[in-house]
Protein backbone atom coordinates (compact mmCIF):
# COMPACT_ATOMS: atom_id res chain seq x y z
CA UNK A 1 0.00 0.00 0.00
CA UNK A 2 1.42 3.38 -1.00
CA UNK A 3 0.92 6.10 1.64
CA UNK A 4 1.42 9.71 0.54
CA UNK A 5 0.96 13.04 2.32
CA UNK A 6 -1.91 15.17 1.07
CA UNK A 7 -3.14 18.72 1.58
CA UNK A 8 -6.72 17.85 0.57
CA UNK A 9 -7.91 14.90 2.67
CA UNK A 10 -11.60 15.89 2.36
CA UNK A 11 -13.88 18.34 0.54
CA UNK A 12 -16.16 20.69 2.50
CA UNK A 13 -18.86 22.93 1.02
CA UNK A 14 -18.45 25.91 3.35
CA UNK A 15 -21.79 27.39 2.22
CA UNK A 16 -23.60 24.34 3.61
CA UNK A 17 -21.48 22.87 6.39
CA UNK A 18 -22.30 23.85 9.98
CA UNK A 19 -20.63 22.77 13.18
CA UNK A 20 -22.27 19.67 14.63
CA UNK A 21 -24.54 19.98 17.64
CA UNK A 22 -23.96 17.08 20.05
CA UNK A 23 -27.69 16.96 20.82
CA UNK A 24 -28.10 15.54 17.28
CA UNK A 25 -26.24 12.31 18.01
CA UNK A 26 -28.37 9.18 18.12
CA UNK A 27 -27.61 8.78 21.82
CA UNK A 28 -29.09 12.22 22.53
CA UNK A 29 -31.93 12.10 19.97
CA UNK A 30 -33.34 8.98 21.55
CA UNK A 31 -34.16 11.17 24.57
CA UNK A 32 -35.87 14.05 22.75
CA UNK A 33 -36.64 13.21 19.10
CA UNK A 34 -40.24 11.97 19.33
CA UNK A 35 -40.27 11.38 15.55
CA UNK A 36 -37.43 8.83 15.75
CA UNK A 37 -38.19 5.10 15.64
CA UNK A 38 -35.79 4.68 18.57
CA UNK A 39 -37.34 7.36 20.79
CA UNK A 40 -36.89 6.36 24.45
CA UNK A 41 -35.35 3.03 23.42
CA UNK A 42 -32.06 1.74 24.81
CA UNK A 43 -30.46 -0.80 22.54
CA UNK A 44 -29.78 -3.34 25.29
CA UNK A 45 -33.40 -3.39 26.47
CA UNK A 46 -34.21 -6.66 24.67
CA UNK A 47 -31.17 -8.56 25.98
CA UNK A 48 -33.14 -10.84 28.35
CA UNK A 49 -35.35 -11.98 25.48
CA UNK A 50 -32.35 -12.53 23.21
CA UNK A 51 -30.47 -14.52 25.85
CA UNK A 52 -33.55 -16.66 26.48
CA UNK A 53 -33.57 -17.58 22.77
CA UNK A 54 -30.18 -19.31 23.34
CA UNK A 55 -28.64 -18.33 20.00
CA UNK A 56 -24.89 -18.84 19.56
CA UNK A 57 -22.97 -15.67 20.49
CA UNK A 58 -25.74 -14.29 22.71
CA UNK A 59 -25.33 -16.09 26.03
CA UNK A 60 -25.87 -14.86 29.57
CA UNK A 61 -22.10 -15.19 30.22
CA UNK A 62 -21.15 -13.23 27.08
CA UNK A 63 -23.61 -10.50 28.05
CA UNK A 64 -22.05 -10.27 31.53
CA UNK A 65 -18.62 -9.89 29.92
CA UNK A 66 -19.93 -7.26 27.51
CA UNK A 67 -21.27 -5.10 30.35
CA UNK A 68 -18.06 -5.59 32.35
CA UNK A 69 -15.94 -4.41 29.43
CA UNK A 70 -17.30 -0.87 29.91
CA UNK A 71 -16.38 -0.71 33.61
CA UNK A 72 -13.39 1.66 33.44
CA UNK A 73 -15.11 3.91 30.92
CA UNK A 74 -18.34 4.06 32.92
CA UNK A 75 -16.88 4.29 36.44
CA UNK A 76 -13.73 6.41 35.99
CA UNK A 77 -15.44 9.79 36.36
CA UNK A 78 -12.27 11.85 36.04
CA UNK A 79 -11.02 10.37 32.78
CA UNK A 80 -12.31 13.27 30.70
CA UNK A 81 -11.94 15.99 33.33
CA UNK A 82 -10.66 19.33 32.07
CA UNK A 83 -9.00 19.78 35.48
CA UNK A 84 -6.03 18.03 37.04
CA UNK A 85 -6.88 14.77 38.80
CA UNK A 86 -5.67 14.49 42.38
CA UNK A 87 -3.13 16.71 44.08
CA UNK A 88 -0.10 18.23 42.40
CA UNK A 89 2.94 16.23 43.46
CA UNK A 90 5.12 18.52 45.67
CA UNK A 91 8.25 17.52 43.74
CA UNK A 92 6.49 18.58 40.53
CA UNK A 93 5.64 21.95 42.11
CA UNK A 94 9.32 22.58 42.83
CA UNK A 95 10.26 21.80 39.20
CA UNK A 96 8.18 24.58 37.64
CA UNK A 97 7.00 24.64 34.02
CA UNK A 98 8.88 22.66 31.38
CA UNK A 99 10.57 24.87 28.76
CA UNK A 100 9.16 23.29 25.58
CA UNK A 101 11.16 25.21 22.98
CA UNK A 102 11.54 22.36 20.47
CA UNK A 103 8.10 21.33 19.09
CA UNK A 104 9.58 18.45 17.09
CA UNK A 105 11.33 16.95 20.13
CA UNK A 106 8.22 17.42 22.29
CA UNK A 107 6.08 15.74 19.64
CA UNK A 108 8.37 12.72 19.79
CA UNK A 109 8.04 12.65 23.59
CA UNK A 110 4.25 12.97 23.40
CA UNK A 111 4.02 10.10 20.91
CA UNK A 112 6.24 7.90 23.06
CA UNK A 113 4.04 8.69 26.07
CA UNK A 114 0.91 7.88 24.07
CA UNK A 115 2.34 4.47 23.24
CA UNK A 116 3.32 3.92 26.89
CA UNK A 117 -0.25 4.76 27.94
CA UNK A 118 -1.71 2.19 25.56
CA UNK A 119 -2.36 4.04 22.30
CA UNK A 120 -1.70 1.99 19.16
CA UNK A 121 -1.74 5.01 16.84
CA UNK A 122 -1.08 8.68 17.58
CA UNK A 123 -0.95 11.84 15.49
CA UNK A 124 -0.90 15.59 16.04
CA UNK A 125 -2.80 18.37 14.27
CA UNK A 126 -3.79 21.98 14.75
CA UNK A 127 -7.32 22.39 16.12
CA UNK A 128 -9.66 23.25 13.23
CA UNK A 129 -12.66 25.06 14.77
CA UNK A 130 -14.98 23.53 12.14
CA UNK A 131 -14.71 20.21 13.96
CA UNK A 132 -15.74 21.57 17.38
CA UNK A 133 -19.32 20.85 18.36
CA UNK A 134 -21.47 23.98 18.34
CA UNK A 135 -23.21 22.85 21.54
CA UNK A 136 -22.63 20.05 24.00
CA UNK A 137 -25.22 17.45 25.01
CA UNK A 138 -26.66 19.84 27.63
CA UNK A 139 -27.19 22.53 25.02
CA UNK A 140 -24.36 24.77 26.25
CA UNK A 141 -22.17 26.36 23.55
CA UNK A 142 -18.80 24.59 23.27
CA UNK A 143 -15.97 26.94 24.14
CA UNK A 144 -12.33 25.89 23.99
CA UNK A 145 -9.54 28.21 25.18
CA UNK A 146 -7.88 29.77 22.11
CA UNK A 147 -4.50 28.83 23.56
CA UNK A 148 -5.30 25.10 23.15
CA UNK A 149 -4.18 25.09 19.52
CA UNK A 150 -2.98 21.52 19.13
CA UNK A 151 -4.81 18.20 19.24
CA UNK A 152 -3.12 14.91 20.10
CA UNK A 153 -5.29 12.19 18.58
CA UNK A 154 -4.89 8.63 19.81
CA UNK A 155 -6.19 5.41 18.27
CA UNK A 156 -6.87 2.45 20.56
CA UNK A 157 -6.96 -0.89 18.76
CA UNK A 158 -9.84 -3.27 19.40
CA UNK A 159 -9.45 -7.05 19.53
CA UNK A 160 -9.75 -7.94 15.86
CA UNK A 161 -10.68 -11.60 16.40
CA UNK A 162 -13.52 -10.54 18.71
CA UNK A 163 -14.69 -7.86 16.25
CA UNK A 164 -14.84 -10.47 13.49
CA UNK A 165 -17.61 -12.22 15.48
CA UNK A 166 -19.87 -9.16 14.94
CA UNK A 167 -22.72 -8.65 15.58
CA UNK A 168 -22.42 -11.14 18.49
CA UNK A 169 -21.90 -9.98 22.07
CA UNK A 170 -18.15 -10.74 21.92
CA UNK A 171 -17.63 -7.98 19.34
CA UNK A 172 -19.59 -5.51 21.46
CA UNK A 173 -17.34 -6.45 24.39
CA UNK A 174 -14.33 -5.54 22.23
CA UNK A 175 -15.92 -2.11 21.76
CA UNK A 176 -16.35 -1.76 25.53
CA UNK A 177 -12.74 -2.74 26.17
CA UNK A 178 -11.71 -0.13 23.58
CA UNK A 179 -13.64 2.58 25.43
CA UNK A 180 -12.23 1.51 28.81
CA UNK A 181 -8.66 1.54 27.44
CA UNK A 182 -9.42 4.96 25.91
CA UNK A 183 -10.35 6.34 29.35
CA UNK A 184 -7.06 5.09 30.80
CA UNK A 185 -4.89 6.40 27.96
CA UNK A 186 -6.50 9.83 27.70
CA UNK A 187 -6.44 10.45 31.46
CA UNK A 188 -2.74 9.57 31.62
CA UNK A 189 -1.93 11.75 28.61
CA UNK A 190 -3.80 14.73 30.10
CA UNK A 191 -1.96 14.37 33.42
CA UNK A 192 1.36 14.11 31.58
CA UNK A 193 0.71 17.43 29.84
CA UNK A 194 -0.39 19.03 33.12
CA UNK A 195 2.76 17.76 34.84
CA UNK A 196 4.72 19.70 32.21
CA UNK A 197 2.51 22.65 33.27
CA UNK A 198 0.52 22.84 30.04
CA UNK A 199 -3.19 22.87 29.42
CA UNK A 200 -4.94 19.55 28.70
CA UNK A 201 -8.55 19.11 27.56
CA UNK A 202 -9.18 15.37 27.13
CA UNK A 203 -12.13 14.12 25.09
CA UNK A 204 -13.74 10.90 23.97
CA UNK A 205 -16.62 11.33 21.55
CA UNK A 206 -17.59 14.63 23.22
CA UNK A 207 -16.75 18.29 22.41
CA UNK A 208 -15.36 17.77 18.88
CA UNK A 209 -15.63 15.35 15.96
CA UNK A 210 -12.91 12.75 16.35
CA UNK A 211 -12.75 11.49 12.77
CA UNK A 212 -11.80 14.74 10.96
CA UNK A 213 -9.27 15.49 13.71
CA UNK A 214 -7.78 12.02 13.22
CA UNK A 215 -7.64 12.64 9.47
CA UNK A 216 -5.92 16.00 10.05
CA UNK A 217 -3.47 14.23 12.37
CA UNK A 218 -2.52 11.80 9.61
CA UNK A 219 -4.03 8.64 11.09
CA UNK A 220 -6.21 7.65 8.15
CA UNK A 221 -9.12 8.58 5.89
CA UNK A 222 -12.92 8.42 5.92
CA UNK A 223 -14.41 5.22 4.52
CA UNK A 224 -17.76 4.30 3.01
CA UNK A 225 -18.55 2.80 6.42
CA UNK A 226 -18.55 6.31 7.93
CA UNK A 227 -15.53 5.45 10.06
CA UNK A 228 -11.88 6.29 10.10
CA UNK A 229 -9.99 3.70 8.07
CA UNK A 230 -6.29 3.44 8.88
CA UNK A 231 -3.55 1.64 6.94
CA UNK A 232 -2.47 -0.23 10.10
CA UNK A 233 -5.76 -1.27 11.75
CA UNK A 234 -8.48 -0.62 9.22
CA UNK A 235 -11.45 0.65 11.24
CA UNK A 236 -10.75 -1.66 14.16
CA UNK A 237 -10.01 1.11 16.66
CA UNK A 238 -11.54 3.74 18.93
CA UNK A 239 -10.49 7.39 18.92
CA UNK A 240 -9.84 9.92 21.66
CA UNK A 241 -8.10 13.26 21.66
CA UNK A 242 -6.66 15.90 23.94
CA UNK A 243 -6.31 19.61 23.14
CA UNK A 244 -3.29 21.40 24.55
CA UNK A 245 -1.26 24.61 24.43
CA UNK A 246 1.99 22.63 24.45
CA UNK A 247 3.78 23.71 21.23
CA UNK A 248 3.90 20.67 18.96
CA UNK A 249 4.75 19.80 15.37
CA UNK A 250 1.61 18.78 13.42
CA UNK A 251 1.61 15.65 11.25
CA UNK A 252 0.30 15.73 7.69
CA UNK A 253 -2.90 14.07 6.44
CA UNK A 254 -2.36 10.92 4.38
CA UNK A 255 -3.76 9.51 1.16
CA UNK A 256 -3.54 5.75 0.68
CA UNK A 257 -6.15 5.48 -2.06
CA UNK A 258 -9.09 4.75 0.23
CA UNK A 259 -11.69 6.78 -1.63
CA UNK A 260 -10.93 4.94 -4.86
CA UNK A 261 -10.99 1.61 -3.00
CA UNK A 262 -14.39 2.46 -1.52
CA UNK A 263 -15.76 3.39 -4.97
CA UNK A 264 -15.04 -0.16 -6.08
CA UNK A 265 -15.91 -1.98 -2.86
CA UNK A 266 -19.26 -2.27 -1.10
CA UNK A 267 -18.39 -4.97 1.42
CA UNK A 268 -19.37 -2.85 4.43
CA UNK A 269 -22.70 -1.94 2.80
CA UNK A 270 -23.39 -5.60 2.03
CA UNK A 271 -22.50 -6.64 5.59
CA UNK A 272 -24.73 -4.00 7.19
CA UNK A 273 -27.84 -5.76 8.51
CA UNK A 274 -29.42 -2.36 9.14
CA UNK A 275 -29.08 -1.32 5.48
CA UNK A 276 -27.58 1.91 6.77
CA UNK A 277 -24.61 2.19 4.40
CA UNK A 278 -24.90 3.56 0.88
CA UNK A 279 -23.85 1.28 -1.98
CA UNK A 280 -23.76 4.09 -4.55
CA UNK A 281 -20.51 4.42 -6.45
CA UNK A 282 -19.95 8.12 -5.80
CA UNK A 283 -19.94 9.93 -2.43
CA UNK A 284 -21.94 13.14 -2.10
CA UNK A 285 -22.40 16.22 0.07
CA UNK A 286 -25.81 15.00 1.26
CA UNK A 287 -26.86 13.87 4.73
CA UNK A 288 -28.59 10.50 5.18
CA UNK A 289 -30.41 11.31 8.44
CA UNK A 290 -30.82 13.99 11.11
CA UNK A 291 -27.62 12.84 12.83
CA UNK A 292 -25.43 13.69 9.82
CA UNK A 293 -24.08 17.11 8.86
CA UNK A 294 -24.47 17.86 5.14
CA UNK A 295 -21.70 19.68 3.29
CA UNK A 296 -18.86 17.13 3.48
CA UNK A 297 -18.10 14.74 0.62
CA UNK A 298 -18.65 11.19 1.88
CA UNK A 299 -20.95 8.22 1.87
CA UNK A 300 -23.18 9.35 4.74
CA UNK A 301 -24.30 6.51 7.01
CA UNK A 302 -27.95 6.46 8.06
CA UNK A 303 -27.41 6.43 11.82
CA UNK A 304 -31.16 5.96 12.47
CA UNK A 305 -31.17 2.65 10.61
CA UNK A 306 -27.91 1.69 12.29
CA UNK A 307 -29.31 2.27 15.76
CA UNK A 308 -32.54 0.45 14.87
CA UNK A 309 -30.39 -2.59 14.08
CA UNK A 310 -28.53 -2.23 17.39
CA UNK A 311 -31.93 -2.38 19.14
CA UNK A 312 -32.83 -5.57 17.24
CA UNK A 313 -29.36 -6.96 17.95
CA UNK A 314 -29.53 -5.88 21.63
CA UNK A 315 -25.88 -4.84 21.36
CA UNK A 316 -23.54 -2.56 19.42
CA UNK A 317 -22.64 -3.87 15.98
CA UNK A 318 -19.28 -3.85 14.19
CA UNK A 319 -20.20 -5.57 10.92
CA UNK A 320 -18.92 -2.59 8.92
CA UNK A 321 -15.58 -2.77 10.74
CA UNK A 322 -15.28 -6.54 10.40
CA UNK A 323 -16.14 -6.57 6.68
CA UNK A 324 -13.57 -3.99 5.65
CA UNK A 325 -10.53 -5.46 3.88
CA UNK A 326 -8.33 -2.90 5.63
CA UNK A 327 -9.46 -4.29 8.99
CA UNK A 328 -8.79 -7.79 7.76
CA UNK A 329 -5.28 -6.80 6.76
CA UNK A 330 -5.64 -6.90 3.00
CA UNK A 331 -6.29 -4.06 0.59
CA UNK A 332 -9.32 -4.51 -1.73
S1 LIG B 1 -22.59 -0.60 13.00
FE1 LIG B 1 -23.70 -2.31 12.01
S2 LIG B 1 -25.74 -1.47 11.62
FE2 LIG B 1 -24.41 0.27 12.00
S3 LIG B 1 -23.66 0.95 9.99
FE3 LIG B 1 -22.13 -0.49 10.80
S4 LIG B 1 -22.78 -2.47 9.97
FE4 LIG B 1 -24.54 -1.10 9.75
S1 LIG C 1 -15.43 -2.27 3.32
FE1 LIG C 1 -14.78 -1.48 1.33
S2 LIG C 1 -16.21 0.19 0.90
FE2 LIG C 1 -16.35 -0.23 3.09
S3 LIG C 1 -14.90 1.18 4.08
FE3 LIG C 1 -13.79 -0.75 3.71
S4 LIG C 1 -12.81 -0.48 1.71
FE4 LIG C 1 -14.39 1.11 1.88
Image: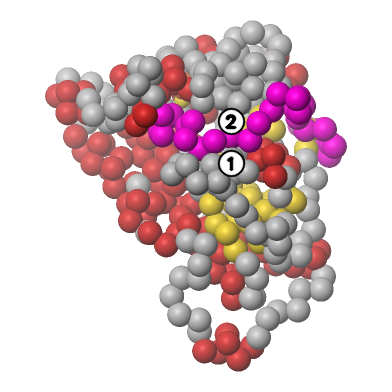
Tell me, for residue 133, which label it has, or none.
1
What residue span does the magenta drawing correspond to?
A: 1-29
Residue furthest left in the image: 52
Q: Nearer the viewer, residue 194 or 135?
A: 135
Is residue 235 within the magenta segment?
no
Mark 2, residue position: 227
| Residue 14, image x, y percentages | 76, 28
Secondary structure beneath disc 2? loop
Secondary structure beneath disc 1? loop
| Residue 198, image x, y percentages | 65, 71
Q: Is residue 177 left or right of residue 330?
A: left
Q: Residue at x 33, y 56 (%)?
A: 75
Q: Residue at x 76, y 74 (%)?
A: 100
Q: Quadrant of the C terminus?
A: top right
Q: Is mark 2 within 8 Å of ligand 2?
A: yes
Q: CA distance from mark 1 to mark 2?
A: 18 Å
Amino acid sequence: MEIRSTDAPYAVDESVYQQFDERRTIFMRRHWDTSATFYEKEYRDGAARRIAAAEPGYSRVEFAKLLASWTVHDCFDGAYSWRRLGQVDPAMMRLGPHEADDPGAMSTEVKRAASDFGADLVGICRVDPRWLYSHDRSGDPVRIPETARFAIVMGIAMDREAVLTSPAYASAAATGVGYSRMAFAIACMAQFLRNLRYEAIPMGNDTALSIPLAIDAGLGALGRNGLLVTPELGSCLRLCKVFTDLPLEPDRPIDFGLQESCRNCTRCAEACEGEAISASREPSYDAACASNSPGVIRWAVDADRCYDFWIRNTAACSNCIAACPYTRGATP
